Amino acid sequence: MALNWDIIEGKWNQFKGDARTQWGKLTDDEWDQINGRYDKLVGTLQERYGWERAEAERHVDEFFSNR
């Protein structure tokens, strides 16, 4: 994981709006539970989208590396 997730977690409210647009299947409660945590986001995307862990990680890494 090349991104600094401490920074993303600290600025989660700034990132959350764009992330909600990207992954619209997630509920408000799920976003609140994720709260900027990488593993929680990856796991939730796996559940909602039926992705394998590596695919979910790739989507998350690509999304946040462009921020």
Image (cartoon, rainbow, N blue to C red):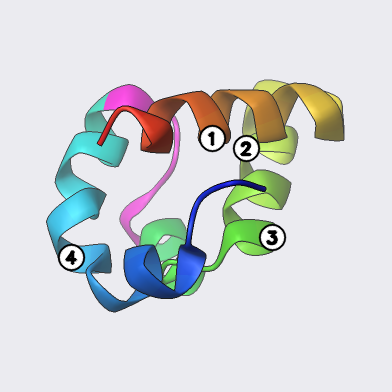
In the rendered view, would you say 16 is above or below 45?
Answer: below
CB contact under 8 Å: marks 3 and 1:
no
> What residue is pinned by disc 4?
13
- Label 2 crowding class (10 Å Cα cut-off): few <14, some 14-19, many 20+? many
Q: What residue range appears in magenta? A: 22-28
Q: Which is nearer the N-term, disc 3 or disc 1?
A: 3
Q: Dot 1: what SS? A: helix
Q: Which is nearer the N-term, disc 2 or disc 1?
A: 2
Q: Position of residue 23 (x, y in %)?
A: 40, 28
**At 55% across and 34% down in the image, what residue appears?**
61
Q: Which is nearer the N-term, disc 4 or disc 3?
A: 4
> What residue is pinned by disc 3?
39
Q: Is residue 45 left or right of residue 65?
A: right
Q: Is residue 64 left or right of residue 44?
A: left
Q: Dot 4: what SS? A: helix
- Between 52 and 65, the one lying in front of the other is 65
Residue 25 occupies quadrant = top left
> What residue is pinned by disc 2?
45
**At 47% across and 59% down in the image, what residue appears?**
30
Q: Is residue 24 left or right of residue 62?
A: left
Q: Position of residue 18 (x, y in %)?
A: 19, 36
> What residue is pinned by disc 1?
60
CB contact under 8 Å: marks 2 and 1:
yes
Work out whether residue 51 can be spotted.
no
Q: Position of residue 37 (x, y in %)?
A: 54, 68
- Label 3 crowding class (10 Å Cα cut-off): few <14, some 14-19, many 20+? few
In the rendered view, would you say 64 is above or below 9?
Answer: above
Q: Is residue 39 magenta?
A: no
